Image (cartoon, grey):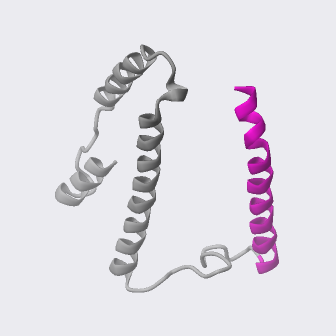
Amino acid sequence: AVRQASCFRKYGEEADCRESENFYMIGFGVLEVILAQLPNLGKITVISVIAAAMSFAYSFIGLGLCIGKLIADGRIKGTLTGAGIFDGVTLESRTWDAFQALGNIAFAYCIAPLLIEIQ
C-alpha cells in the first residue's frame, strides 16, 4: 500500500501502480514452514517480544500517520462525537453506537481468557 501510494504521488492518479503480493505471500509461507519446525512456540519468549514490538510499531505508524494528516490539513476535522460526515445521524444515535461498541469490546475482553483455555 505504501509503494502504491508513493507511485500514485509520483506518477499521478491515472498511473498503473499495481503491486504484486506474491513475494510477500511466499515469504510468509516460508516463515510459517520454518516456525512449524520449532518444538513448542509457547515457550519461546522471542516470539512474544517480536509480537509486542510489532504491536507497538503498528501503533506508532498509525499515530505518525494521524499526526502527518493533522499537519497536512492544519486542523482537526473530527469531534468527540464523531466526524461531521454523518449529516442524517443524530448525536444521540452516534453516542448510543459508541456505547454499544464499548460494550462489545468489554464482552470480547471477558471471553478472551476462555479462548486461551480452549486453545
Magenta extent? 90-119
Look at the picture and state if 5 lies above or below 77: above
Pick the front one: 93 or 100: 100
Q: Position of residue 66 (x, y in %)?
A: 42, 70
- Compared across the picture, whether 4 is left or right of 85 comes to left
Quarter of the figure that contains the C terminus: top right
Q: What residue appears at the point 60 percent right and 76 percent down from the top-left corner?
A: 83
Q: Position of residue 97 (x, y in %)?
A: 77, 65
Residue pushed farthest bottom? 75
Pick the front one: 114 or 29: 114
Q: In which quarter of the image is residue 89?
A: bottom right
Pick the front one: 55 or 83: 55
Q: What residue appears at the point 79 percent right and 67 percent down from the top-left corner?
A: 99
Q: What residue appears at the point 48 percent right and 83 percent down from the top-left corner?
A: 76
Residue pushed farthest left? 10
Q: What residue appears at the point 64 percent right and 80 percent down from the top-left corner?
A: 80
Look at the picture and state if 109 lies above or below 113: below
Q: In which quarter of the image is residue 46?
A: top left
Pick the front one: 78 or 102: 102
Give the main secondary structure, helix, strand or loop, of the magenta stretch.
helix
